[in-house]
Amino acid sequence: MKFKLLLPAIAAVIAIGILGFLLKMTQSVDSNLHRARLENIRAVDNLDIELNRMFTQTRASSLAGSAADRTKITQRLGKDLDALDKGPTALRGLNKDLDKKLDQFLDTIEAKFELGFDFEARNTLLNQGLVNNMDAVPFNSDAVLAAAPAAKQEMLKPLIMQLKTELLTLSVTPAPNNAGTIRDLISQMKAGTEAPSEAFTAAMESLNGNCEEIIQDKTEMLDKLSSFLGRPTGAQLQAVEQAYTAWYQGEVANANQYRVILVGYAALLLLILAWLGIRLRRSYGELDKANGKLVDANEHLEDQVEARTKDLSSALSDLRNSQAQLIQSEKMASLGQMVAGVAHEINTPLGYARSNASIVRTTLADIRDLCSAQDRALTLMTSADASDEEVANALSDADERRQLVNPTEVMGDLDNLLEDTDHGLVQIADLVSSLKDFSRVDRSRNDQFRVNDGIDTALKICQNQLKNRVEVIRQFGDLPEIECSPSKLNQVFLNLFTNAAQAISDTGKIFVHTSAEQNGVSIRIIDNGCGMTDEVRQRIFEPFYTTKPVGKGTGLGLSIVFRIIEEHGGTIDVHSVVGKGSEFTIRLPLKQQRPADNETAPSLAAA
């Protein structure tokens, strides 16, 4: 029924969603955004061309004069490249082919930037070396003329002049054959001199060194410039522009197709709306009929509500009776378990007390026989009619009995036996007293109660489940007395200690910590048993929920614990880890709320 009511709403949502999707798909790429992207591509291309032109115009002169302009162009180019890669006008992410071409272009221009920076950094050093070598050429040329023979000086002058011209041309506007011409001129100057002097040879070597360094510096500059200008950024940017244009044209064509689909879909929606209008008109008539029937049903509604209310009240009464019976059953089960444990605890000291009494009775009979034999011997010794043989026999009999019963040892044994018997009777008296305190009837929650004493009492009651298997470690704080129902709190402690003992399969420990808080007391009961999963921990206070086998538990123990603590205005928290154990933390107030407090509680909560 609910699905049928939701079906029209779901259909309407789907129809609106499809309409919105078609409207979105019919929207082609924003023309302003398209123009901005194209302008950005053109700006990158123009800046790249301008940067190439500035590096091309650089020759032997220093780059310092144009460094500021190149920095501005590089900064502008960097911003435009970032706009291509990210931002509102970015080309990134439109399609895979465009991303691939854009990555190729960005990698190339990044490498070009690195070459440009390297060129600028190296050019300063090369220029300085070029200037120093050019300045040294006239000095070394004059040294060559001065060291050359007089007959050869006229021949060297035009060669030196031509060498200077070639070097100047190489440094300013280099040509492909400059380096070869310079080396030929050096060779001509060296040739034609037989047995040259050492001064001439040294001057020629210096001049030749200057020329070779100039050629090498200029060649390195030209190679770096050629490598910079040889990067195919223009062609790759053009490929990016073509890929973007193809994507844009495809988007426009796709939007036109969705426009056609949108027109057809709108026509279909109009037909459906017309059909729904007809159905709605018919539904109005049926609704009027149903409304009349509803008016008739309302006239008998109060009678139906009254009958249902009676049924619910009866069911609630039955439920409360069942709940009371179940709680009573749980109490009787706990009582049976407690009585079994108490009987065992009483029988143990009572057994060895009876055994000790039997031993004392036997020993007293032996002592009585010894006393009788000694009394008879003493009587015969003081009697005038007794013969020496009778006296000797009586003394011998008394001595034999004395050897059988050593009075000193026997009296020590009797003292020990009586002391053990007294200890057992004290244990029985303490257990009976604890049982009396534990089970005392108190119908109010206004009794003053020592929590530490109640815990000790509960531990004594369930000692049968703990001893020889579970070690109880107490850490009691100095607690004030609290207002409560002692018997109910004793039941809480007994249930928690019993559960903790049952959670320990073999041997283990139970830690009991108590501490005073600002407005109450805190009790922590920790065991190192099997622990609980989060699913079990969240349900342990639910009535009838139990993890024990069928017939081993009712599932009401912890539910009653929770209700008793809640009735006392306290809280109980549980933390547990599977395989490590569980921790129950109980917090109880020092005083119970009075009826007046309960009446004002709603107003305080509302405030």
Image (cartoon, grey):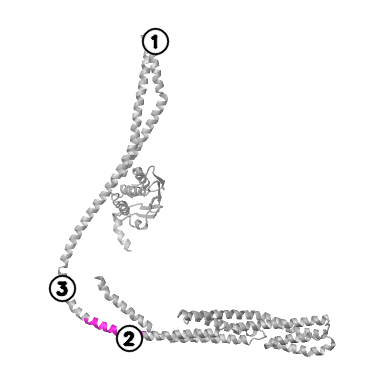
Q: Residue at x 38, y 28 (%)?
A: 414
Q: Residue 367 or 5: which is nearer the viewer? A: 5
61 sits to left or right of 319: right
- Nearer to us of marks 3 and 1 is 1
Most common secondary structure along the magenta stretch: helix
* C-alpha distance separating marks 2 and 3: 45 Å
Q: Are marks 2 and 3 in contact (CB under 8 Å)?
A: no
**Number of numbered labels in the structure image:** 3
Q: Which residue is mark 1?
A: 388
Nearer the N terminus, badge 2 or badge 3? Answer: 2
Nearer the N terminus, badge 3 or badge 1? Answer: 3
Res 377 → quadrant: top left
Amino acid type, residue under disc 2 in the picture: Val
Q: Secondary structure at mark 3?
A: helix
Q: Which residue is mark 3?
A: 293
- Per the rendered image, the range of residues in magenta is 258-278
Amino acid type, residue under disc 1 in the picture: Asp
Q: Residue at x 77, y 81 (%)?
A: 206
Q: Are marks 3 and 1 in contact (CB under 8 Å)?
A: no
Q: Which residue is mark 2?
A: 263
Q: Secondary structure at mark 1?
A: helix
Neighbourhood count class around disc 2 (C-alpha, 10 Å): few under 14, some 14–19, many 20 upward = few
Q: Residue 582 or 457: which is nearer the viewer? A: 582
Residue 34's x, y, as percent? 45, 86
